[in-house]
Image (cartoon, coloured by chain):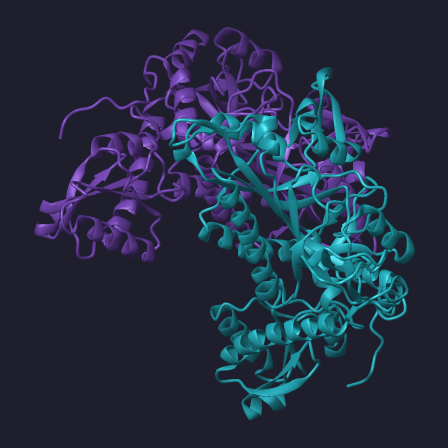
Chain colours: A purple, B cyan
Amino acid sequence: MAKETYVEQIADIETDFPQWYTDVVLKTKLVDYGPVKGTMVIRPYGYAIWENIRRELDARFQALGIQNAYFPLLIPMSFMTKEAEHVEGFAPEVAVVTHAGGEKLAEPLCIRPTSETIIGSMYSKWIQSYRDLPVRMNQWANVMRWEKTTRPFLRTSEFLWQEGHTVHATAEEAMRATLQMMDVYEEFAKTCLAMPVLTGRKTEKEKFAGAEATFGMEAMMHDGKSLQAGTTHYLGQNFAKAFDIKFLDSDGVQKYGYTTSFGVSTRLIGAIIMTHGDARGLVLPPVVAPVQAVIVPIAAKKEGVAEACRALKERLAARGVRVVLDDSENSPGWKFNEWEMKGVPVRIELGPRDLQAGKCLLARRDTLEKSECALDGAEDAVASLLDEISRTMYERAAARMDRRTVTADSLDALLKGVEGGNFVRAGWCGCRACEDKVKEFAQATARVFERENTAETCVVCGKAATATVIFARAY
Amino acid sequence: MAKETYVEQIADIETDFPQWYTDVVLKTKLVDYGPVKGTMVIRPYGYAIWENIRRELDARFQALGIQNAYFPLLIPMSFMTKEAEHVEGFAPEVAVVTHAGGEKLAEPLCIRPTSETIIGSMYSKWIQSYRDLPVRMNQWANVMRWEKTTRPFLRTSEFLWQEGHTVHATAEEAMRATLQMMDVYEEFAKTCLAMPVLTGRKTEKEKFAGAEATFGMEAMMHDGKSLQAGTTHYLGQNFAKAFDIKFLDSDGVQKYGYTTSFGVSTRLIGAIIMTHGDARGLVLPPVVAPVQAVIVPIAAKKEGVAEACRALKERLAARGVRVVLDDSENSPGWKFNEWEMKGVPVRIELGPRDLQAGKCLLARRDTLEKSECALDGAEDAVASLLDEISRTMYERAAARMDRRTVTADSLDALLKGVEGGNFVRAGWCGCRACEDKVKEFAQATARVFERENTAETCVVCGKAATATVIFARAY
C-alpha cells in the first residue's frame, strides 16, 4: 500500500500542547466556536461522548435513589444576594436578562451560573417534616459563567453539566453524602474515563462560594498540569438559612436542614482529551467512545470482503459494541489516519487474505499494537480487548501521575517541580499569605489536601504545617 | 376495610376542567410554579415522563441517522433579523441579555426561542459540497418565549424540547423529510402516548414564522379543544439564503440548500394529562408512565405478605416493568387513591388470602376493572396487561375524536360544533378574511387541512372552497 499524506495536520503534542489541543478538538469535529465570543457548539462526535458520560453517571445516581428534575434557567437577581459569599463569587460572572417580551423587567434576572439559590427556594416550599428528608435531586442542564479567557470544553461561557442538590436532617449525614458522591465520581472517572484522580478537600481560597467545605477531584493532564474534573460541596446551613429550608424534626422542634451540592460538566471531555491524547490525536476511553471499533476493509472490491465486513459489523453490534464500517472511497491508509486521529479504541482490518485464513487484524489505538484474531468469535475478542484497553489506559495514566508527583521542601523545589510538569506535595501552615505566595512565586495553586493534621513544615514560611497539600499549575 | 376520605381533593373534571388540570398537575407533583412569573419547575414525577418521551423519540431519531448535538443558548440579536418573517414572529417574545460579566454587551443577545438562525449560521460554515448533504441534527434543549398567559406544560416562558434541523440538496427531498418526520411523530404519539392525532398542513396564518409550509399534529383534549402537539416545517430556501447555506453541487454549480425543522416539547405532558385524565386524576400511558405498576400489600403484617410482595417486585423489575412496592404506613384505601390520582396503569393487590390461593389482584387504571391473576407468571400477565392498556387508551381516545368531529356548512353550525366540544370540518375559500371571521365569530382557528383542492363551499363566504379544514378551539 502506497504511503500517502493525510490531509489533517495537528501540532506537535510535546512542543505545542495548547495548539495540539485546539487542532484536535476542531479537526476531529468534537466542537466548534459559536458565533458569540466564548461559546461553543458541541458537534455530534463530541456530544456523543457527553451522552455516554451522562448515561453512565445517571445510572449511578439512580442506583443511589437520586431523582432527576428540572429547575428554571432564570434566577431573580435578589436570590443571588441572599447568601453573602455566593453572590460575591458569582455576581461578576453572571449574564443578566433585563428585557423580555418587549418590555423592561421590573427585576433583572440572571442566567443560572449554578442553582443552589433557586433550588433552595423550592426545597423551602416542599420540605415540611423530617419525614420528607433526605431530599436528593439532580438536573442535567446548561449553565452560564461569563469568562474572559475561554477554551472549548475547558472554560466556556455556557456549558452543560449535572448539578445535584441534597438536604439532610443532620450535619453528619450531609457530610457523609458529600464524601460519598466524591467516591462515586472517582469510581466513575476510573471505570468510564480510564482516568486516575486525586481527591480531597480544597483550601478556603479554592472552595465554592457559599460552601463550608469543597472536595475536588483533580486529574493530571499530558503536560503535568492539573484539571479540576468535579467537585462536591458541604454547604452546612448556609443556604438553608438564606432560603429558609426548615423542617419539623421528630422531637417537635423546627430546624434548618443541611445541604450539599455536586457537579461535573462537559469539562470532562477536555479532561479525557488531555489525559489520554497522543501525537496522532485523540485516544478515547472505550466506555464513553462514540465509536468503539471501526472496520476498515482492505481491497474492499475483492470477492467476499464487503460481505464479510458487513457480517462482522452486525455481530459486533449485536454484541453491544458501537461499531462503524468505513466503506467510503478513501484509501485504507487515509482511513487509518482518520480513525486514529478520532481516537477509536479498536481498528479492525479485514482483507481477502484474512478472509481466506479466517481471521482479521485488530489494531489497538492506545498502544498501537496489532494482533491477529479469528473471525469466528471476533466479537468476543473485540469486547475483551475494549476492557483490556480501558485497564491499560488507566494504568498508564496512573503510573504517570504517580511518577510525576514529587515532594518539595522549599519554594524553589516547588517551582522546579511544577515547571517540570509535576504535582508537588508540600507542607502548608494553613495561612492565606503562604498560599498566595506559592501562586505568585510558582504560578501554582493548592489543588487538594493530601493529609490534614500533618507533622511537616510549611514550604513557604517554615512554620509547623497543618496539612500536606498537592500544589500544581492548573487549567 | 373502613372507608376513609383521601386528603387530596381535585376539582370536578366535567364542570371545571381548567381547575381540574391545575389541581392534578400540582397535587400529583408533576410540576410546581417557579419563582419567576411564567416559569415552571418540573418535579421528578413529571421529569420522568419527559425522560421516557425523550428515550422513545431519540431511539426513533437514531434509527433515521439523525445526530444529536448542542448549540449555544444565546443568539446575537442581529441573527434574528436576517429572516424577515422570523424576526416579526419571534422578536416580541424574546428575552434579552444586555449585560454579562459586569459589563454592558456591545450587542444584545437573545435567549433562543428556537434555533434556526444560530444552527443555520453553523451549517453555513460546515457545508461545502453536495457530499456533505443531507445534514440532519437534533438537540434536546431549553428554549424561552415570553408569554403573557401561562399554564404549566402548556405555555410557559421556558420549556424543554427537541428541535431537529436538516439541510437537503433539493426541495423535493426536504419536503419528503418534513412529511416523514410528521409520520414519525404520529407513530410515536400513537405507540407511546396512546394519543390519536390529526396531522396536516397549516394555513398561512398559523404557520411557523419563516416557513414555506408548516405541518402540525393536533390532539383532542377531554373538553374537545385541540392542542398542537408537534410541528414540522418545510423552510424552503428562506433560512439558507438568510444564512448563506450553500453547497457546490455535483454539476459544479453553487446552490442554496433547502432546510427543514421539527419539534415537540414538554407540552406533550400537558397533552397526555388532558387526553387521558379522568375524575380520579391522571391516567398515564404505560410506555411513558414513570411507574407502570404499584404493588399494594393488604394486611402487610400477616405472615408471608411482605416477602411475597418483595419477591413479586423483583420479578416484575427483572421483566422490565417499572414497579414500586408501596410499603408505607398508609392504609390500603389511601394508597389506592394516591396511586390512582398519580395515574399508575396497574395496581397489584396482594394479601394473605391471595397468597394462600396463589394469586393476586390486578386493577387497571384506565377502565378501573379488576381481575385475578396467578402469582406464578404474574410478571408476564402484567406486561401483557400494560400493552392491552395502551391499546385500550388509544382506541378510547380515537373513538372520542371520531365521535366528536362534526361537519358544518354554516358559521352557526361551526360555532355550535366548537361550543359542543367538537372538531369541526368545513370548507374554506382560502382567504385570510374568512379565516379571521371564524376566529371572531366562533373563537376557533384552522388547525390543519384535512384535504386540499376540495369541491365544497367556504363555510364563511359561500364561495368555492380550496380546502377542507378542521377548525377547533385550541390551547
The quadrant of the rendering that contains the C terminus of chain B is bottom right
Q: Is residue A234 above or below residue A387?
A: above
Please state the horizontal and vertical placement of residue A349, each as a whole percent of the image.
19, 42
For image coordinates 78% across by 43% down, the residue present is B39
For image coordinates 24% across by 55% down, the residue present is A311
Please state the horizontal and vertical placement of residue B286, each as a whole percent of the image.
60, 68
Please state the horizontal and vertical placement of residue A99, each as a whole percent of the image.
81, 28
Q: Is residue B9 above or below residue B149?
A: below
Q: Residue furthest bottom?
A: B357
The quadrant of the rendering that contains the N terminus of chain B is bottom right
B125 displayed left or right of A347: right
B253 displayed left or right of A446: left
Q: Is residue A186 above or below residue A206?
A: below
Residue A90: quarter of image: top right
A303 displayed left or right of B58: left
For image coordinates 77% across by 71% down, the residue present is B404
Q: Is residue A187 above or below residue B220?
A: above
